[in-house]
Amino acid sequence: MSLLIAGFTLCACTEGLGGVGDNPITPETPTTPDEPETPETPTEIKGILSEISVESEGNNGVLAFTYGDDGKVTKAAYKSVDPFTGDSYEGLSCTFTYETDKITVKAKRDDNVETKVYTLTDGVVTKYADDYGYDEFTYKDGKLIGFKAWEKNEESGEMETDELFDFSWNENVIASYERYELNDQEEKEDVNNYTVTYGTVKAGVLANIFFYGGGVFELPFYVEDLAESAPIFDKLGAMPEYLPEKLVRTWKEEGNDVTRTITAKYTLDSNNLVTKVVVKVVEGENTEETTYNLKWK
């Protein structure tokens, strides 16, 4: 966002005044008004995300993005990498077609090709659909406040609620959110609560990656899945200005309370672009660490 300040030049004109004797009256010099203070221009994050690589125990891979001349992503392809041999294997590969009110995704894995469609309303995503179900997105004051995932029952063919997300905003940040399912009585079950703490790292387009689909904190499992959602990273409405540095997730498992604490540390380049994210997950006595490397162009 840029702020334009319009400046005005004040011109003071004086007429000649008659004097007495040798001491003419000198007209008073007009006072030049103080120059208005120029407000600080917000730092604008520039750069196109070209690659996300993930390094974790037994799960390494690279998600690469290709862009057209108009700046829109045209392809996203994932390759898994064997951590022991270094051999790479083709994973999910997606191509995108853009229209005014929708984005069509052709997703290919091995010899299987699926069609997925994002519906846009006033420039933001309001629905996602594929052969297995659909998601509905809800906004308030331009901010994403939730989405519902519906899945087709293979036996009955009917759509059933799969997962729902409700986001709670505190001014301009998502302070917390819920992920849950609904039973036949439309009651919440399998509720996961997330509380978010933010740092000072500017988010840019990465904010959408963090919060769509439950958050990048749940990766590395979702890195490959990000391929099909690449064209909507900037089409989810307003998002928090800063990236989260801590997330606490709580839920019940077999009647017991479970807490997972997830923290993220960021490395920035000279353009304030995030080039590395180290995510640490602590759950009980178990600790896992995953590293994400990001490339920009």
Image: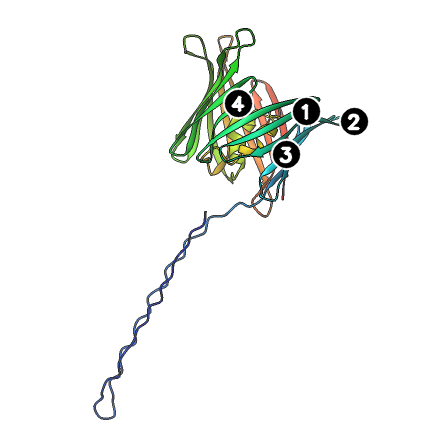
Which circle, 4 or 2, is nearer the viewer? Answer: 4
**Which of the pair 274/158 is nearer the observer?**
158
Q: Which residue is identified by label 2? A: 85
Q: Which residue is identified by label 3? A: 75
Give the tally of numbered discs: 4
Of pointers 2 and 3, the one earlier in the residue sequence = 3
Which circle, 1 or 3, is nearer the viewer? Answer: 3
Q: Amino acid at mark 3?
A: Lys
* Residues under numbered marks 1 and 4 in contact, where contact means CB atoms less than 8 Å apart: no
Q: Which residue is identified by label 1? A: 59
Q: x%, y% of residue 224? A: 63, 26
Badge 2 marks a residue whose secondary structure is loop
Asked whether residue 294 is in view, the answer is: no
Q: Which residue is identified by label 4? A: 129
Q: Which residue lies at the image location 48% right of the left edge and 34% below the top edge?
A: 198
Q: Amino acid at mark 2?
A: Thr
User: How far is mark 2 from mark 3, CA to CA?
Assistant: 27 Å
* Residues under numbered marks 4 and 2 in contact, where contact means CB atoms less than 8 Å apart: no
Structural crowding at the residue carrying mark 4, measured as other residues with C-alpha within 10 Å and reported as few (<14), some (14–19) or many (≥20): some
Position above or below: 11 against 281:
below
Of pointers 1 and 3, the one earlier in the residue sequence = 1
Q: Which mark is residue 6?
A: none
Whether residue 15 sits left or right of residue 187 in the image: it is left
- In the picture as drawn, the residue positioned furthest to the bottom comes out as 21
Q: x%, y% of residue 247? A: 50, 27
Q: x%, y% of residue 293? A: 64, 35
